[in-house]
Image: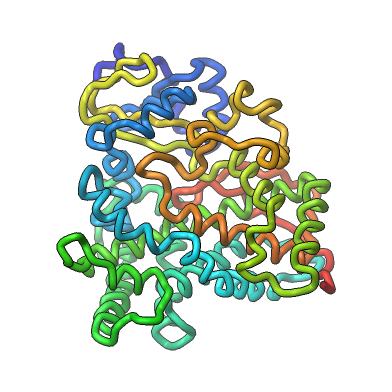
C-alpha cells in the first residue's frame, strides 16, 4: 500500500460511502474542499487519486499503456464479464485483441444496424401507457437490450433467441441490482448453491454459456458469410498469425458488450429524456429538427447524420450527467503526472464529471446548453464521456448512433411530460448511474406524424 503522505489529501474513509449513495454530490464536495486533486480510499483496494486537471487527463491518455493499466483498474467490474474480456487486459495483449474488435464498430458497420435500432425503439414506444405515469429508464433498457440481441448477438425470434433473451434478462436484473454491485468484491462471490445470490448467477451464466457455445459451433460450421452482427464478425476475425479468437474470448467479449454497453447506453438515454423534460425549449427545438429531417418518412441510416441538434443535446447531457463519472489507470511504476509524484500501485482516476464542469473550459458549466456543441469543437482531454486514449470505449460510435435514432423516434412519435414533484438524482445500476426511480414520465399524446 503506498504511504499516505505521498498522496494528495482527500476525505476520510467513512465519507467515501457517500460516493455510492450520491456520487455527484460527493465529487462536488471533494472538488470544493481539495481542488483539482484528491485521494479516495476504498476498503480492501489501493487508493484512487482523482484529478480534474486537463493536463493530467492528456498525460494519462497519451501515456505508456504498459505503466498505466486500465485492465487492472477495471478488475472490480469483472464479476460476470470474464477474465478474457478486453476490458480487463493490458499492454500488447489488449492492443492485439482490440484490433480485432474495432472493425465491428466502424461507421458503415454501425449504420447497417439502423433498422434494428429503430424497430426496437418503435416496438417499445408502442407499448407505453397513455396519460399514466411509468418509469422510462426500464423502457430504455428494453430498447438497448433488444438491439444488442439482434445487432450484436445476431439472434432472431426463434426458440434459441427467446431462450437467450429470458436468461440474459434474469442475469442483467441480478447484475444491475444492489447485489450485483456487491459482487465487485471477490469475497461476495460465494457459490453456496441455487439459494445463494452468487450461486444463482453462476447457474444463469452456465445456461447462457451453453446456448452461446452451441451457437459458436453452429456458425463456425455453417459459415457467417452475409451476416453483419458483431458476434459473426468476431467468429470470422483472425489474429496476425491466422488464428481465430478462442470461443472463451468471444464469450467474454459478448458478455461485456451486453452488460456494460446495454446499461450505459440505456442510462444515458434516460438522462437525455430528463434533460429534455426539464428544458422544454430544447425539447421543442430538437423535435422540430427531427420532424424536418424525417419529413413524414421513417427514419433511415441516411438521415441520422443530419440530426445535429439532437446529437448536441445528447453530448450536452453526457457532459453534465456522465453515467460513469471517472475512469481509472493503475500505475505499475512511480510516475510524475502533471507535476504530481505518484507511487506505483495507486489508481489515477481522471474524473469525467469534474472535468466537464470546469468553468474555464465550459462557461456557465451548470447551464444545460446544447449550442455549445454546435458552436465549437472540444478536445478529447476536456470532453471524455467515453474515456480516451488507447482505452476509449470501442462501442462509442454504436452507442451514439443508437441514441440519436431512439431519441428521434421518441420525439417524432410521442409527447412526454414530467411527473409533478419529481426531481432526478443519480442511482447506481450495474456500472452506470441512472436517474432515480427509473425516471417517471407521462405520455400525454401520440403524434400523428
Q: At which x and y percent is residue 7? A: 33, 16
Q: Is residue 100 left or right of residue 315?
A: left
Question: Does 48 appear above or below 185?
Answer: above
Image quarter where the C terminus lies is bottom right
Q: Is residue 152 left or right of residue 207?
A: right
Question: Does 112 appear above or below 263?
Answer: below
**Could you tell me which residue is drawn at 44 percent across and 41 percent down?**
387
Q: Is residue 45 visible?
A: no
Image quarter where the N terminus lies is top left
**Could you tell me which residue is drawn at 23 percent across and 69 percent down?**
247
Question: Does 6 appear above or below 134?
Answer: above
Total marks shown come to: 0
Q: At which x and y percent is residue 238? A: 23, 66
Q: Quadrant of residue 327?
A: top left
**Could you tell me which residue is drawn at 30 percent across and 15 percent down?**
341
Q: At which x and y percent is residue 291? A: 79, 64
Front residue (pair 358, 31): 358
Q: Is residue 127 visible?
A: yes
Amino acid at each position: 500500500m503506498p504511504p499516505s503522505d505521498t498522496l494528495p489529501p482527500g476525505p476520510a474513509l467513512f465519507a467515501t460511502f457517500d460516493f455510492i449513495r450520491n456520487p455527484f454530490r460527493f465529487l462536488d464536495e471533494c472538488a470544493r474542499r481539495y481542488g483539482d486533486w484528491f485521494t479516495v480510499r476504498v476498503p480492501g483496494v489501493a487508493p484512487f487519486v482523482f484529478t480534474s486537471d486537463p493536463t493530467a487527463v492528456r498525460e494519462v491518455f497519451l501515456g505508456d499503456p504498459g505503466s498505466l493499466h486500465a485492465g487492472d483498474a477495471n478488475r472490480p467490474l469483472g464479476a460476470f464479464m470474464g477474465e478474457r474480456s478486453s476490458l480487463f487486459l493490458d499492454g500488447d495483449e489488449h492492443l492485439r485483441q482490440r484490433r480485432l474488435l474495432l472493425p465491428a464498430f466502424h461507421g458503415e458497420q454501425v449504420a447497417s444496424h439502423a433498422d434494428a435500432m429503430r424497430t426496437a425503439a418503435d416496438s417499445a414506444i408502442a407499448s407505453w401507457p397513455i396519460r399514466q405515469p411509468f418509469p422510462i429508464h426500464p423502457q430504455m433498457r428494453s430498447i438497448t437490450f433488444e438491439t444488442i440481441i439482434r445487432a450484436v448477438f445476431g439472434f432472431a425470434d426463434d426458440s434459441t433467441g427467446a431462450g437467450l433473451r429470458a436468461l440474459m434478462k434474469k442475469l442483467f436484473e441480478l447484475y444491475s441490482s444492489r447485489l450485483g454491485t456487491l459482487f465487485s468484491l471477490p469475497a461476495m462471490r460465494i457459490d453456496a448453491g441455487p439459494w445463494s445470490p452468487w450461486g444463482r448467477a453462476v447457474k444463469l451464466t452456465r445456461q447462457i454459456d451453453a446456448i452461446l457455445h452451441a451457437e459458436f459451433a453452429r456458425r463456425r460450421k455453417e459459415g457467417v458469410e452475409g451476416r453483419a452482427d458483431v458476434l459473426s464478425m468476431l467468429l470470422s476475425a483472425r489474429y496476425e498469425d491466422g488464428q481465430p479468437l478462442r470461443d472463451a474470448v468471444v464469450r467474454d467479449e459478448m458478455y461485456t458488450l451486453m452488460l456494460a454497453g446495454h446499461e450505459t447506453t440505456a442510462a444515458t438515454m434516460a438522462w437525455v429524456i430528463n434533460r429534455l423534460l426539464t428544458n422544454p425549449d430544447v425539447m421543442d427545438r430538437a423535435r422540430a429538427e427531427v420532424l424536418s429531417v424525417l419529413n413524414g418518412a421513417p427514419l433511415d441510416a441516411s438521415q441520422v447524420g443530419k440530426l445535429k441538434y439532437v446529437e448536441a443535446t445528447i453530448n450536452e447531457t453526457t457532459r453534465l450527467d456522465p453515467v460513469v463519472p471517472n475512469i481509472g489507470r493503475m500505475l505499475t511504476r512511480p510516475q510524475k503526472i502533471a507535476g504530481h509524484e505518484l507511487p506505483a500501485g495507486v489508481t489515477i482516476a481522471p474524473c469525467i464529471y469534474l472535468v466537464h464542469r470546469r468553468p474555464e473550459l465550459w462557461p456557465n458549466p451548470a447551464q444545460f446548453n446544447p449550442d455549445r456543441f454546435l458552436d465549437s469543437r472540444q478536445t478529447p482531454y476536456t470532453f471524455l464521456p467515453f474515456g480516451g486514449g488507447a482505452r476509449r470505449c470501442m462501442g462509442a460510435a454504436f452507442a451514439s448512433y443508437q441514441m440519436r435514432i431512439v431519441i428521434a423516434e421518441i420525439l417524432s412519435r410521442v409527447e412526454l411530460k414530467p411527473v409533478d414533484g419529481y426531481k432526478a438524482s443519480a442511482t447506481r445500476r450495474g456500472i452506470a448511474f441512472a436517474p432515480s426511480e427509473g425516471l417517471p414520465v407521462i405520455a400525454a399524446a401520440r403524434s400523428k406524424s
